Image: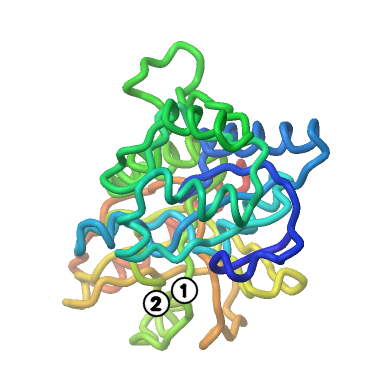
Amino acid sequence: MERWHGTAEVPQDFGPSVVTIGVFDGVHRGHREVVRSAVARGRALGLPTVVLTFDPHPSEIVRPGSHPPLLTTQRHRAELLAGEGVDAVLVLPFSLEVSRWAPAEFIRLVLVERLHARAVVVGANFRFGHRAAGDVAALQAAGQEHGFEVVPVSLRGPEGESADNRFSSTRVRALIADGGVAEAADLLGRPHRVEGVVVRGDQRGRELGYPTANVETVPFAAVPTDGVYAGWLITDVDKPEKSVRHPAAISIGTNPTFDGVDRRVEAYALDRDDLDLYGTHVAVEFAARIRDTLKFDSIQALLDRMADDCKVAREITDAA
């Protein structure tokens, strides 16, 4: 799959294509319906499918300080999109200038002149252009002028759900913020993931017999609420040929038993005390929430509960 950062990286000889547009944060099940529709249309027309997405998140440019928690890194998002059969991803750097483009300007500069769109597939509630002035109807009108068809795709949830319960990144973020990682996984179609570099912490886990990877997450990561979770620690995520997915017990919080202050994401790979991960890029995936963060009266009480947590985490990950 091709990856282009900015329209200048699109090859000059790039021909007609099918385009789908969106932030696609999380690449949840609703997003995948849109992307799969675009891929199917591309194959029917014998054309490559391009995902047009944005970085940074448009809300941060339009309303500084409002950057939402991110469900995926750009790299992971591209991997997920590639898995759906996309031929290329164009990441458009979203700036104040871009935010001020009128809908017609966006269509001309990107869809027509750079991507030579023959079909544009979007969610039925798609908005674009300055102050979100453009919608599907405006896109369809432009398509008649420039020679591309527009295919709107519904983002409703599973059959029987109301329109208010449609798939959305906002809904997934809310679930994660409440610790509802199992429910979020149902909407995503896979476990929620956070990524980062393993840094040195207090090394208290190693002293207690539970060496953890202290993960310094990427900026704006959608980290679940404090608690203990079952999930997986994925090593070497930037080196797929070496990557390993380890069942794990995960702690998020400030370690109140030791009067901690800094909020941390720490993952213990079950039954492993031989992993040297400092400085490596890892991912943590969440299967289910086990319990709240607690302050224990003694180290032994903490150890007893950690043993129980690991047993539950093992049962959950074995069954996943």
What x and y, as percent, mark residue 4? 62, 66
| Disc 1/disc 2 C-alpha distance (Å) | 5 Å
The residue that label 1 is drawn on is: 196
Query: Is residue 150 toward the left or the right of residue 212 in the image?
Result: right
| For residue 131, above or below residue 254 | above
Residue 216: mark: 2
Q: Which amino acid does label 2 sit on?
A: Glu
Q: Which residue is at the front of the view, 69 or 246?
A: 69
Q: Are marks 1 and 2 in contact (CB under 8 Å)?
A: yes
Q: Residue at 47% across / 74% down in the picture? A: 196
What x and y, as percent, mark residue 287? 49, 47
Question: Which one is earlier in the sequence, the residue at label 1 or at label 2?
Answer: 1
Q: What residue type is labelled 1?
A: Gly
Query: Label 2: few (<14), some or many (≥20) within 10 Å?
Result: some
Q: Is mark 1 on a helix, strand or loop?
A: strand
The quadrant holding residue 127 is top left
Given the current orientation, which residue lies at the most extreme right position? 46
Query: Is residue 164 toward the left or the right of residue 113 in the image?
Result: left
Query: Is residue 212 toward the left or the right of residue 237 in the image?
Result: left
Quadrant (top left/top right/bottom left/bottom right) for the N terminus: bottom right
Quadrant (top left/top right/bottom left/bottom right) for the C terminus: top right
Residue 100: mark: none
| Residue 251 appears in the rendering | no
Q: Is mark 2 on a helix, strand or loop?
A: strand
The quadrant holding residue 234 is bottom right
Q: Residue at 41% across / 85% down in the picture? A: 207
Query: Is residue 229 toward the left or the right of residue 53 in the image?
Result: left
What x and y, as percent, mark residue 81? 63, 50
Q: Residue at 61% across / 72% down in the picture? A: 235
Query: Label 1: few (<14), some or many (≥20) within 10 Å?
Result: many
